[in-house]
Image (cartoon, rainbow, N blue to C red):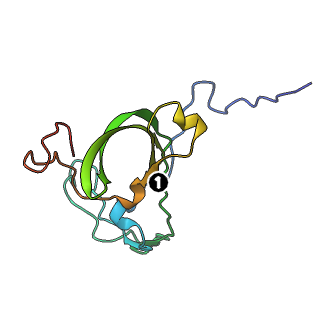
Amino acid sequence: DLQINLVASPGGPNAVRTSNFCLVGSHKLTLSSIGKNKFLLEKIKYEGELLTGMFHTKVPFLCPLEGHIHLKMQCEVGMNVEEKGFLTMFEDVSGFGAWHRRWCVLSGYCISYWTYPDDEKRKNPIGRINLANCTSNTVDAVNREFCARPNTF
């Protein structure tokens, strides 16, 4: 038998307690923060009628935070994507380029491809493309002079 001891709140069942904590500094972590371990606490805006719009210039007196925060962080990108379907791929065949329709499976960071959908279960893929190694700041449609096929990027 599981017994649960309930303790009544001294303020009653609808009592709400407020925290004595207050914000003394902040720093916004972004992807550019990766690899750094020292961050300057940003100025905190005063709240109140007379001081609205004014800022602390440093962390308050006797605060354990001295203007900087030191921390170790690690960024790990995880994805659980799996998509399947036909794609038309440009491949080199005896020195000449040719378009071939391939059954492709996107799983995580890798696109594996076969000739037919049934081959996925029976054969090793014809090839794999590791997308973790294919990075670019932009992805655009290919100029029609380079490739006349629509939806090519």
Counting from the top left corner in percent of width and height, residue 129 is at: 41, 53
Q: Residues within 10 Å of mark 1 (few under 14, many from 20)?
A: few
Q: Viewed as shown, does residue 128 lie left or right of 4?
A: left
134 vs 52, nearest the viewer? 134
Quarter-of-image position of residue 102 = top left
Per the image, the residue denoted by label 1 is: 77
Q: How many marks?
A: 1
Q: Viewed as shown, does residue 141 lie left or right of 114?
A: left
Q: Which residue: 24% across, 54% down?
A: 96
Residue 29 appears in view: no
Q: Which residue: 12% across, 51% down?
A: 146
Residue 81 appears in view: yes
Q: Is 61 situated above or below 93? A: below
Counting from the top left corner in percent of width and height, residue 110 is at: 46, 49
Counting from the top left corner in percent of width and height, residue 151 is at: 20, 37
Secondary structure of the residue carrying tag 1 is: loop
Counting from the top left corner in percent of width and height, residue 26 is at: 37, 60
Q: Viewed as shown, does residue 26 lie left or right of 140?
A: right
Q: Quadrant of the N terminus?
A: top right
23 vs 142, nearest the viewer? 142
Q: Is 30 situated above or below 79? A: below
In the image, farthest residue toward the right: 1
The amino acid on which the numbered mark 1 sits, given as a three-letter code, is: Val
15 vs 22, nearest the viewer? 22
